[in-house]
Amino acid sequence: MRALLRKEMRLSALALTYLFIAFAFMTLIPGYPILCGAFFMTLGLFQSFQNAREANDIVYSALLPVAKKDVVKGKYLFTLFIEMAGFTVMAILTLVRMTALADAPVYRQNALMNANLFFLGMVLVLFGLFNALFVGRFFKTAYKLGKNYVIYIILAFLVIAMAEAVHYIPGFEDVNAFGFAHAGLQIALLLSGVICFVALTFVSFKKACRAFENVDL
Amino acid sequence: MNIVEVKGLVKKYPSFTLQDVSFGLESGKITGFIGRNGAGKSTTIKAMLNLIHADAGEISYFGQTFLGHEAAVKQRIGYSTGVVSWYPRKPIRKIVDVTKAFYKSWDEEAYRRYLTLFGLNENKKPCELSEGMKVKFNLLLALSHKAEVLILDEPTSGLDPFSRDELLTLFGTLKEHGVTIMFSTHITSDIEKCADQILYLSHGILKADCSKEDFISMYGKPGESMEEIFLRLEREVQA
């Protein structure tokens, strides 16, 4: 498993993918749809998948002394590594916004989504969707990328728009809580995001392994 | 004793079918896999490595089925294809450094020896190599982990006559060390020079699986070279 991740990081990945983790810092931009930071990180992953395809990485990996399904595992491991690196930065910055910057006027006057636990849950939903719609579906052919990513973009922006707008619906104001207000609801929303992420990732991984067994390289 | 067994291999494409191909590779022998372009040689080899999904058939290595023991079997076999290059913009040194971590029996000394023998520079990138040198790079990876079985898809394609001769001589040396080799080619002189066994595939059907001597006595006419036999057989199929 370690060798697989190392291969992904040293041979398949583009430096751009690591650089795009920095989009997590968009969490600090006031008056900006901060969920877009998560979307931009997936753009970096898309570039690495494209690079891997052009470098014949999938065939090379399938020839290594691993089972064919481990090729899928390698790509998921790398994707999860980048996603978790980005999520960690976002989580730290969210905590900063929830504590030290909780009363900062630029954030208090923010018409858009606040950085709170609901935001982190939605970041995980976006990553889960990416894993299911892009990474998982990629292994149906092991070369088609574009259509899967377009489908993800459409769905991701629908999710972002919904998450940004939901607190304007009467009765849903608490979703956009500041600091640790409405902690119970916020924790529940974060946990829902975690469950979505785990379920989408796990189910798509299993499906991708099965699909890839039937792919002719 | 057969170290590799292929039984009832079938792969159907819209315009081509590999039909019920069965053969075995004898331990410590060199098997030449011959057939014209499009005969199904690469399809057979890819199916042997689970790179393509066969519609039917079973592949086994060292007495165990490939599916289910894929990782363990691949530790003991080596594969090289003609001119495909992996990671064209990465230095060879980096590709090798990552690759060797996967092999329990990576032989650094053998790697250095073949690197020198093939005249490869570790600092070069595959995109900077000629087609022949790309073949050598693929072979270098296949040879450096003490593979007991080498499956080589057109390893001599793109090599100059001198390099081809060197490679065929190397096959002979590896055979002396007990390595089983199967190589596909459409260059009949390569078969004549070093193969013990011949697999002859035509239009997806395995027409012959026998020793080189038997092949010549069964299909050859007096005075015919291997190339003449092969050409005549193909023309007979076309007619």
Image (cartoon, coloured by chain):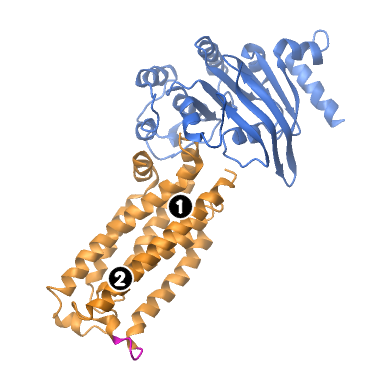
Chain colours: A orange, B blue
Chain identity of mark 1: A
Mark 2: amino acid: Leu
Which x, y percent locates residue A146? 51, 60
Residue annotated with mark 2: A190
**Mark 2 / mark 1, whichever is N-terminal:** 1
**Mark 2 neighbour class, 10 Å CA radius: few under 14, some 14 to 19, many 20 or more:** many
Chain identity of mark 2: A
Magenta stretch: give its range. A169-173
Q: Residue B206: in sight, yes or no?
A: yes
Answer whether residue B82 is magenta in the image. no
**Mark 1 neighbour class, 10 Å CA radius: few under 14, some 14 to 19, many 20 or more:** some
Q: Of A44 and B176, which appears nearest the observer? A: B176
Q: Main secondary structure of the magenta part?
A: loop
Mark 1: amino acid: Gln
Farthest right residue? B239
Which image quarter holds the N terminus of chain B?
A: top right
Relative to B90, is B217 on the left or the right? right
Residue drawn at point x = 38 percent, y = 24 percent: B106
The answer to which quarter of the image holds residue B128 is top left
Farthest bottom residue? A170
Alpha-carbon span between mark 2 and mark 1: 32 Å
Residue annotated with mark 1: A50
Residue drawn at point x = 83 percent, y = 26 percent: B235
Mark 1 lies on a secondary structure that is helix
Q: As displayed, is residue A84 above or below residue A75?
A: below
Q: As displayed, is residue A97 above or below residue B121?
A: below
